[in-house]
Amino acid sequence: MAYIVAEPCINCKYTHCAAVCPVDAFREGPNFLVIDPFECIDCDACVPECPVEAIYPDDELPLEWEHYIDLNDRLSEKWMEHHITETTDPLPDADDWAEKEDKDDLLEESWA
């Protein structure tokens, strides 16, 4: 089992979760974070750190977000060079996006 970052992270990118990860499993994209499932040790340290409740064990992920299992796997490989291990500022409008839903189409996979 690995932990998965889901839709609530899109356009927020709070990074407290990455700072507490003991194995540096987080990868950073332009407007989203993912967890590398091969690095994750299932320690649960990141879950309480996420202010938008975007992190779930893969077997407890809400059904509407099951596609984030594959997305975390694929993007963690694509963003391999973008390890994030410390807290950085969230995106400028993070607080405005925190409560919004249906953000899948806003996910940016490529760095500009």
Image: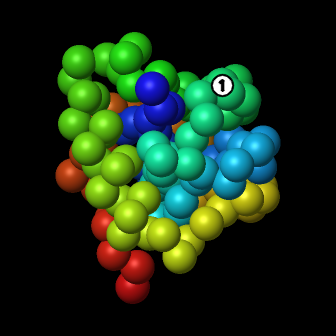
- Viewed as shown, does residue 12 lie left or right of 63? right
Work out whether 21 lies above or below 53: below
Q: Residue 95 versus residue 106: which sits nearer the camera?
A: 106
Q: What residue is shown at x 21% (from left), y 52% (from top)?
A: 105
Q: What residue is shown at x 77% (from left), y 55% (from top)?
A: 87
- Viewed as shown, does residue 34 lie left or right of 62? right
Q: Residue 43 versus residue 104: which sits nearer the camera?
A: 43
- Viewed as shown, does residue 63 lie left or right of 13? left
Question: Which amino acid type is marked by label 1?
Answer: Asp
Badge count: 1
- Label 1 sits on residue: 44
Q: Position of residue 72 (x, y in %)?
A: 37, 48
Q: Identify the secondary structure beneath mark 1.
A: loop
Q: Where is residue 57 in the image (x, y as percent from the top left)?
A: 47, 23
Q: Quadrant of the C terminus?
A: bottom left
- Viewed as shown, does residue 51 lie left or right of 93? right
Evaluate whether residue 97 shows in this view: no
